[in-house]
Image (cartoon, grey):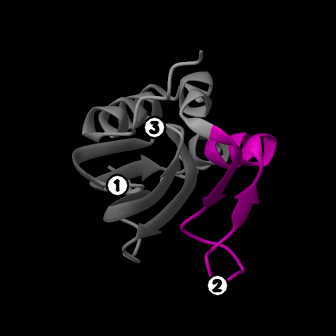
Amino acid sequence: MSTPPRPVDVETLKAFGAAWNRHDIDALMSFMSDDCSFHAVAGPDLQGRSFVGREAVREGFQMAWLSFPDAAWIDAEHVVFGDRGISECTFTGTKPDGTRIEARMVDVFTFRDGKIVVKNAFRKDRPPLRPA
């Protein structure tokens, strides 16, 4: 008899956020379902750029660190209610050209069987800051 998966809770989202800050792609992907999707903060479509499936989501997650090698998600607060969750934090990062972003953001999650099925990211559209 198999054990049912542990439901996603606030501690799960804290651990997911910590993996983002460690830039640990394998840890991040351990939270994602096999049929996961990620809707990035920017892109050509209504939901930004969408990455569907584990390999595409992995690529999309890694793009954040390529775009912002020092990316960090700080001051996070998390809420879970049933099969949905929200993480709110401050995103900070410096692009290779030296421009910096510091803006509040929200991730909206959908869960199934103890895993993240959808990560939908939203960030305030704030002008870049001058290099430090």
The residue where tag 1 is placed is: 82
Q: Badge 1: few (under 14), some or many (20 or more) residues near its Cα, within 10 Å? A: few
Q: Looking at the figure, which quarter contains the N terminus?
A: top right
Question: Marks 1/3: CA distance?
Answer: 33 Å
Residue extending furthest toward the bottom: 46
Left or right, residue 48 beside residue 55: left
Residue of label 3: 70
Q: Residue at x 54, y 24 (%)?
A: 27
Is residue 10 or residue 71 the one in the foreground? 10
Going from the N terminus, do you reach mark 3 or mark 2 first?
A: 2
Give the residues in magenta.
Answer: 33-61
Question: Which of the two residues, 80 or 18, is positioned nearer the viewer here?
Answer: 80
Vertical comparison of 93 with 65: above or below: below
- The answer to which image quadrant residue 113 occupies is top right
Between residues 71 and 116, which one lies in front from this camera angle?
116
Q: Amino acid at mark 1?
A: Gly
Confirm whether the magenta stretch covers residue 25: no
Q: Which residue is mark 2?
A: 46
Q: Nearer the viewer, mark 2 or mark 1?
A: 1
What amino acid type should be assigned to the residue bearing mark 3?
Asp
**Tag 2: residue type?**
Leu
Residue 52 placed where, x, y %? 76, 56
Q: Is residue 117 above or below residue 103?
A: above
| Residue 99 visible, this orientation | no
Q: Residue 102, which numbered label?
A: none
